[in-house]
Amino acid sequence: MSLQTRWRIRWALLIGAWVLAFIPTLRSAQGTGQSTGQGSGQVTIVRSPEIRTIRVLGPTVLPRRLADMAVSVPVDNPLTIEKVALGRRLFFETALSNDRSVSCATCHEPTRAFADDRPLAVGVFGRVGKRHSPAIINRGFGRVQFWDGRVATLDAQVLRPIEDRNEMDLPLDEAITRLDADDYYRTAFQAVFERPVSAEDLGRALASYVRSIRSGSAPYDRYIDGDGEALSPEQQRGLQVFRTKGRCSFCHREPTFTDERFWNTGVAWIAEGADAGTYRDEGRYAVSRIERERGSFKTPTLREVARTAPYMHDGSLATLEDVVEFYDKGGRPNRHLTPIIHQLGLTAEEKHALVKFLESLSGVVTAR
């Protein structure tokens, strides 16, 4: 490759990074036309043993309470706009799958708040996985990854789907060979990391992009920030149900609307038939081997939840109304059911108000 070509790729990477820094990936219908500058414009980056604050280039959609939270970033993978730009290109790269038909974006569609409308993930050769693809917005605030928490960091998590047989089914060695054979990627990795393409840096670039995927500026955020008209009277009643009678806030804690912990709601429990009394999916137990965690799964975020159907780890509930009904009935009783799950006795009006409130958690999704 000529020196001129190398410099063209370097400049394309840099220009792409600046474009990504200022242009949101998408806006929901509720967010269209609204300013994305409600957040503080700063993100606290935790880098052991020190903590420092960096300025985020371009407007941020993060409401004040989220913008003040810490984003966990490994000490060997500081965020840069060039690295995020490379990660974004890799996120949409089908060459990272066995038959070159699947990318990360296949199951995490930007237009669906980086989630999937299929109940279960579908990978190469039409292979169907056993779990639903969760939304990956605001994952920079997360503490554990996957429904069962089997991986602690994003840098490790982003590599797992590439090798998973039911997802992308490509050995990492082969993925690196393909990237290294591409003039663009070979030069881009050298420009960003100052070394040849490697699996570790592939993970670092992808994780950096995922950390940039954020959701905020929802009607709920504006209401919390003092705009009393941001939520309708019915949505305000739904917020009260969410925090009190509905018991939703025990697990879906504001402002991220997840506690990053594992709970058994009975979704995986088989109550009838030949396999009655067992779990379709043992969830967290397969990782921890703690009996009480059998059938438990990580609490998903509720931000953008109106656009991330279907729901639950197995995509078994089609609508928000179905989810509310499931919890109103007390989940599905089993020997490890989380104690806070029980029948709620919600009225029809309370159920409707709760769904309307959940819809108010959809705002603006951006990715740098």
Image (tube, grey):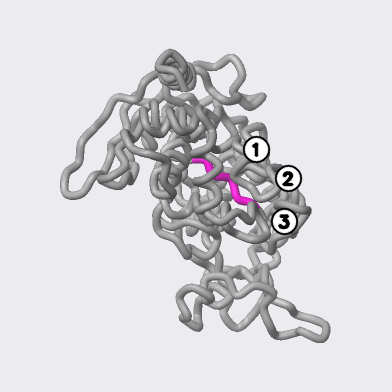
Q: Quadrant of residue 197?
A: top left
Q: Earlier in the sequence, mark 1 or mark 2?
A: 1
Q: CA distance from mark 1 to mark 2?
A: 9 Å
* Residue drawn at 63 percent across, 42 percent down: 103
Circles 1 and 3: CB distance less than 8 Å? no
State the extent of the magenta-drawn residues as a range: 133-137
Q: Using the image as rendered, state which of residue 361 and residue 226 is in the foreground.
A: 361
* Residue drawn at 60 percent across, 37 percent down: 93
- The residue singled out by tag 2 in the image is 117
* Residue drawn at 67 percent across, 42 percent down: 106
Q: Earlier in the sequence, mark 1 or mark 3?
A: 1
Q: Amino acid at mark 2?
A: Asp
Local secondary structure at mark 2: loop
Q: Is-magenta flag for residue 207?
A: no
* Residue drawn at 74 percent across, 56 percent down: 317
- The residue singled out by tag 3 in the image is 120
Circles 1 and 2: CB distance less than 8 Å? yes
Q: Is residue 236 above or below residue 368?
A: below
- The residue singled out by tag 1 in the image is 109
Local secondary structure at mark 1: loop
Q: Is residue 244 shown to the viewer in this render? A: no
